[in-house]
Amino acid sequence: MIDDHATERTDEIPLDQGRTARLRLPVAGPDGRPAPAVVLLHPYGVWDRDAYLPAEASGNGPVRLFADLGTALTAAGTGALSYDTRFLTEDPHGGAGSPRFTFTGLVDDAVRAVEQLRAHPAVDADRVLLLGVSMGAEVALAAAERLGGESRLVVVAPSAEARPVFQRWMGLDRRLEWLAAGFTAADGTVDLAAALADTTGRSGWWEPFDLVERFGPQAGLEVLRAELALEYDAWEDAALAGKDETAPASFWRDWFAQPAPYRRLAGITGRLAVHVGAEDWTTPTRQAHLLHRAALARGLRSQLHVHPGLGHLMSPRTADGLRTYGPFDPDFQRALVASVDEVLRPGPTH
């Protein structure tokens, strides 16, 4: 049943096993035409349908990414559907997980959401778009591949490489890149004391920084390469064995088994818009470039937007230079809504 409000209408859409999604719709116009609609797909982690982050997690006050974006989309005449992620609704079973608590399960939800939207009387079935942020970008591409037909996609802060390769970069290689580029002398000595003092450089991605405690104020780069490789491999083994608190083994094993996101483009046709922050240290711009170039090579209509001064969740640094994780920068949110509108426009998609 649709509830009418002053600026938007809402409806509860069934997903599976009693779970529902909330569909926000623009107020019906005088012509009564169905509206285009967007499925909003979360980053990695425990997110509710509003994509809520408390102040201590965002570094920038309480955040409701999808609630804010949904309001902006409905104001522009586009519906927005969001739902609680399985990280919130599924039992991790002490780290083991289940067949439902997998990356494939997230794709199941996205496919189901698109199918439900296409069947909804208030939605234009030919103009349903998948919008994914970070991990949600991978879910969007996998769902589009499974759904087939002409796709409309907007992805924010995507990764494009195979998960084992990309996860190793996140957990090991970017740390070594940062140390080698900023703190290493010609003889291979790393100034760990200086790295410890660079709180703005490490903000949001390398905490705690315990290398000074472990190796002293200086250490050889090759020694650090070996030690950090052992540290990363121990984390990976633990995650795949169900001993990582952020997701159960069922999720990590399934995610690691997926193909590289950019390779999914071979099974997709249509339109794609890619957005990334120029200061994104989690899914850096090289990932967005790889996805965009692969899309063009596969014949998709793709546009790449690099946003200066923004980090992973498209929010600027604080006044003292620390990275934040939301809310969306207002100019970016306006650009994102305009991008959705462009990708949703009627007409040929390739």
Image (spheres, rainbow, N blue to C red):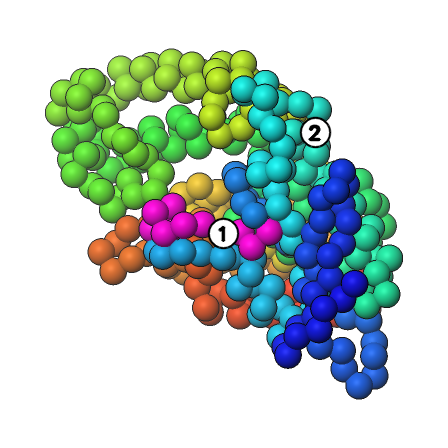
Q: How crowded is mark 2: few (under 14 residues within 10 Å), some or many (20 or more)?
A: some
Compare residues 235 and 163 and report the one nearer the observer.
235
Can residue 181 be seen in the rendering of this structure? yes
Compare residues 33 and 320 and report the one nearer the observer.
33
Q: What residue type is labelled 2?
A: Arg
Which residue is drawn at the image coordinates 79% and 63% (left, top)? 1
Q: Which amino acid does label 1 sit on?
A: Tyr
Q: What percent of the width, then of the height, locates residue 211?
A: 22, 24
Q: Is mark 1 on a helix, strand or loop?
A: strand
Which residue is drawn at the image coordinates 44% and 41% (left, top)? 282
- Dividing the picture into quarters, in which one does residue 23 lie? bottom right
Q: Is residue 295 magenta?
A: no
Name the residue carrying label 2: 100
Which residue is drawn at the image coordinates 44% and 32% (left, top)? 170
> Magenta residues, as a range?
49-59
Q: What element carries label 2?
A: loop
Residues at marks 1 and 2, CA–CA distance in whole angstroms: 23 Å
CB atoms of marks 1 and 2 within 8 Å: no
Name the residue carrying label 1: 52
Q: Earlier in the sequence, mark 1 or mark 2?
A: 1
Q: What percent of the width, then of the height, locates residue 77?
A: 69, 74
Q: In this view, does 319 lie to the left or right of 345?
A: left
